[in-house]
Amino acid sequence: MNDQFHTKDLSGANFLITGGAGFIGSHVAEYLLKNGAAKVRVLDNLVNGFETNLSILRQYAGFEFIEGDIRNADTCQQACIGIDYVSHQAALGSVPRSIKEPVYFNDVNVGGFVNMLKAAVDNKVKQFVYASSSSVYGDEPTLPKLEDRIGKCLSPYAATKKTNELYAQVFADVYGIKLMGFRYFNIFGPRQDPDGAYAAVIPLFVKGIIKQLPVYINGDGEQTRDFTLVDNAVQVNIRGMLSDNAEALNKVYNVAVGENFSVNYLFNACKEYLHSNFEATYREPRAGDIRNSLADISLAKNLLGYQPAKNFQDGLTTTIDFFKQLYP
């Protein structure tokens, strides 16, 4: 990740990344450490995070780690002491799992989020950005997705993210904290977990093709997604935390590339890159899934200067190369 997403000197700034041992959070933390941030504190309970990600961060002098849970209000308060900027990435993130475990998802994604907002207010954090999700668009059929047109939620996961946005707006209005939310569209890239029960589609495909394990495609595979390399998520988090644009505050932004591809296209692209003729198995569509997804990213471009650094094809080759090293 060589691109510079900031112009400010970071040497006097202290950052907190919740979920910083996880996929997106570890990339955000690494960017800040590489670029000379005074302190980058990670709060993670290591349920979805990995020690291997922390080991990448530990080589930097400015790194701090708190092993703890955002469901504990005291832990959140401790984590925010002396912090200037927060990037809140800690969450549970699977639609099918949320359908099985709605109470757990609410406890972490909503209760934990409110704990973090309160801690940020109490500790006078300058700016707070957080992960929302494209799932909040629900059954709204319009493509591309525009931030002010959302539909009915299709899963408990989507409901938790929509609730985060509601709480953020209330905290901005009532307590004056400066906030931004990011609706991620199918973020992928190196370090994404290929082994969990609810692993994301790209690492699952690559691992399955390389190791000749069953690969499943839900429905007919013609559902489309705006696949977005993790570098783009890092960029918007950095720009959001450091933005001086008053007009950009207290809004929610699509984070995507603005192109969509079908799951079938994705699988065939993985096969082609890996020089494989391995075939997928088709099965029933998955409950709670949106059929088509495509983002309008003009709001983030106009107010945050966001510009996708890499498109889907570039990101896919980078990601496949990473997973090839894991599964030689």
Image (cartoon, rainbow, N blue to C red):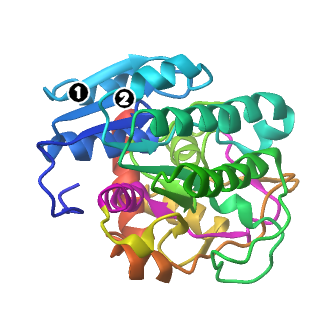
User: Which residue lies at the image location 50% right of the left edge and 25% below the top edge?
Assistant: 76
Structural distance between the alpha carbons of marks 2 and 1: 8 Å
- Label 2 close to label 1 by CB (< 8 Å): yes
For label 1, the crowd category at 10 Å Cα-Cα, with few meaning under 14, some 14 to 19 and many 20 or more, is many
Q: Closer to the N terminus: mark 2 or mark 1?
A: 2
Q: Check the image and report above or below for 28 versus 273.
A: above
Residue 327 can be seen, yes or no:
no
- Look at label 1 and name its amino acid: Phe
Determine which residue is flagged by label 1.
63
Q: Is residue 28 left or right of residue 248?
A: left
The spot of residue 284 in percent (x, y) is 88, 53
User: Which residue lies at the image location 66% right of the left edge and 49% below the top edge?
Assistant: 167
Instruction: Tell whether position 112 is magenta.
Output: no
Q: Is residue 251 left or right of residue 327?
A: right
Determine which residue is flagged by label 2.
42
For label 2, the crowd category at 10 Å Cα-Cα, with few meaning under 14, some 14 to 19 and many 20 or more, is many
The spot of residue 63 in percent (x, y) is 23, 27
Provide the residue span drawn in magenta: 214-242
User: Which residue lies at the image location 73% right of the left edge and 29% below the top edge?
Assistant: 107
- Look at label 2 and name its amino acid: Val
The spot of residue 278 in percent (x, y) is 60, 52
Residue 82 can be seen, yes or no:
yes
